Image (cartoon, rainbow, N blue to C red):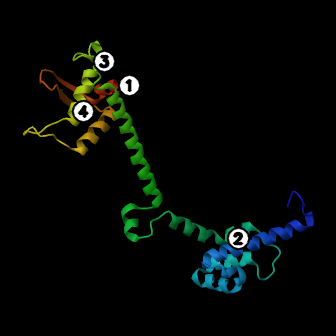
Amino acid sequence: MDVIAPMSEARIPGEKLMDLTNFGRYVLCLAGNTLEALQDPGRWLEVVKRRGGALGGALGYLVNLEGNTTRNINEFLANVSDVLVTYVDASLQYATPAFLRLMGSYNDHLEGYLSRELENGRLVRLLTKLGFINERPEFDHNPQWHESGDRFLLKLFRDYVFHQVNDMGDPVVDLAHVLACLNKLDAGTEERIMLVSRDEQACFIVTYKEVYPFSLAAS
């Protein structure tokens, strides 16, 4: 309608005041949790003032039952700023005190969750690269893939991470060991490990930093 039948300049201030009034009534409906506030704003303003005086007073300024013609949104925001800060702070927290003590703010929880997902993504990419390199029979006659080649270290590292056995010969299934090894490889630490071939005829003492470049061969 603003394009088809543009209003005169004289009507704009009155329309702005009406917008403020309607906005105040809709917020009053939210604050009172009822649509009855549209028909009876005076009654529900009193209800909201009893629940929270600052918010009720600010909404009364918007609803304008007194017919004030000098209102503006900036004054409303100044009146309700304390309430906004309180509600925004509450929206970033869990509702129950137990979760608040355990996890802190909801925003901190989301940031921690995102950090874990980013870490998982790094490990998945590392595992993918290792999967591309290990057990490639088509390269059996390639010197780089022989026992004396660079990729042989990755095969031994794969056994060190995933295929360890205990004194009884039973497989060791330890997720903490897997995650620790992969994180140390990704970081390229100076910690030394001993890699032994399955026939126990080859043994290397290397650092994660020395193994790391070979894990990038599939990049």
Q: Which amino acid does label 3 sit on?
A: Glu
In percent of width and height, residue 62 lies at 73, 75
For label 2, the crowd category at 10 Å Cα-Cα, with few meaning under 14, some 14 to 19 and many 20 or more, is some
Q: Earlier in the sequence, mark 1 or mark 4?
A: 4
Residue 34 versus residue 126 in the image, above or below: below
Q: Which of marks 3 and 4 is nearer the N terminus?
A: 3
In percent of width and height, residue 84 lies at 60, 68
Residue 126 versus residue 200 in the image, above or below: below
Q: Which mark is residue 76?
A: 2
Q: Earlier in the sequence, mark 3 or mark 2?
A: 2
Look at discs 3 and 4 and give the one toward the viewer: 3
For label 3, the crowd category at 10 Å Cα-Cα, with few meaning under 14, some 14 to 19 and many 20 or more, is few
* Residue situated furthest left in the rendering: 168
The residue at the point 62 percent across, 79 percent down is 34
* Residue at the spot of label 1: 218
Could you tell me which secondary element the residue under label 1 belongs to? loop
Q: Residue 191 carries which label?
A: 4
| Quadrant of the frame with the C terminus | top left
The residue at the point 71 percent across, 74 percent down is 24
Q: Which amino acid does label 4 sit on?
A: Glu
In percent of width and height, residue 69 lies at 83, 75
